Amino acid sequence: MTWVAWRQQRLLTLVSLGLVAVVAAGMAWLWADVSSVLPMDLGPLGERYSDFLSYVPMVMLVLPVLLGMFAGAPVFARELEQGTHVFGLTQSVGRGRWWATKLLVAGVPVTVAMTLLGLLNAKALGPLSFIMTSRLQTPMFESQGIVLGMYTAFAFALGATAGLLVRGTLGAMAVTIGGYLALLVVVGNAARPHYATPEFTASGSADPGVWRVEIGYLDALGKPMNFAAGDCGLDSFPKCMADQGIASQFTRFHPVERFWDFQLLESGIFVLAAAALLGAGAWAVRRIH
């Protein structure tokens, strides 16, 4: 059964792995190149890599859903469209084994490859954090670390399960795009800021690389205040703040040291979501005729 599943999926699997390998080669070159010029002044380093880094997040955000669409969605949808699933289900192999084998053969290689790519990215992008947004913020958070593999696992599970339910490759691909983007946006905006209690500083400044989740103003007693910045001129800004009773600025932030903790928490969310989808797929495969 494993050999049959591999023969059916090998073209898309090899193409998917080849795509990941090309991207990994680019990131390995970046890592080697950065390592060869460090230490050096930050200014020249930023000029050298800023254009390249503007494309990295776009590629990394798109890769998981592409793999979900082209490696996950056709796993079952193509057989259901062509009617060839009947041959597999009428053999001595049970439905559960047929379903699980196809998922493992097609899904595990791309998930492992994307996890390794994410770890490579974390190494390559680390020295360049000073010219990027915080590693905890979108889009840099999604572009590196173990979450890249878990995003892929979710997108693959979504595509495969959608194929069982929709029974059409194009429909399953559309569901994969919509579901992946929806969960990515919701988690990044609604969940990630609350993975831990933000730290607080009343100085109005924080170390470079932190994720600032709130910036505001305090009066002399340390109570938050609203500041009507539009009523102040540029030349009299400090005096205008004092006239409004503002004594200092505060910042709530997540320190960059929480990066790997946040990676584990977000990975857990996507693993649970993928598991729920696979549960739905296990239910759906029993109802295929």
Image (cartoon, helix red, strand yellow):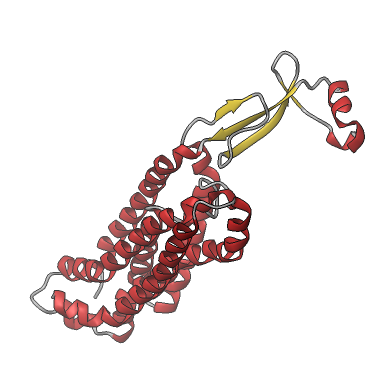
**In the figure, residue 260 lies in which quadrant?**
top left
State whether residue 258 is above or below residue 197. Answer: below
| In the foreground, 1 or 30 | 30
State the quadrant of the N terminus: bottom left
- Left or right: 260 in relation to 8: right
* Residue 239 screen position, x and y as percent: 88, 25
Could one spot residue 166 in this view of the protein? Answer: no
Count of labels in the image: 0
* Residue 164 screen position, x and y as percent: 32, 70
Residue at 36 percent of width and 46 percent of height: 268
Residue at 17 percent of width and 65 percent of height: 96
- Left or right: 94 in relation to 23: left
In the displayed image of the protein, which residue is found farthest to the top?
221
**In the figure, residue 52 lies in which quadrant?**
bottom right
Residue at 38 percent of width and 49 percent of height: 267
State whether residue 148 is above or below residue 59. Answer: above
| In the foreground, 92 or 105 | 105
| In the foreground, 53 or 242 | 53
Could one spot residue 274 in this view of the protein? Answer: yes
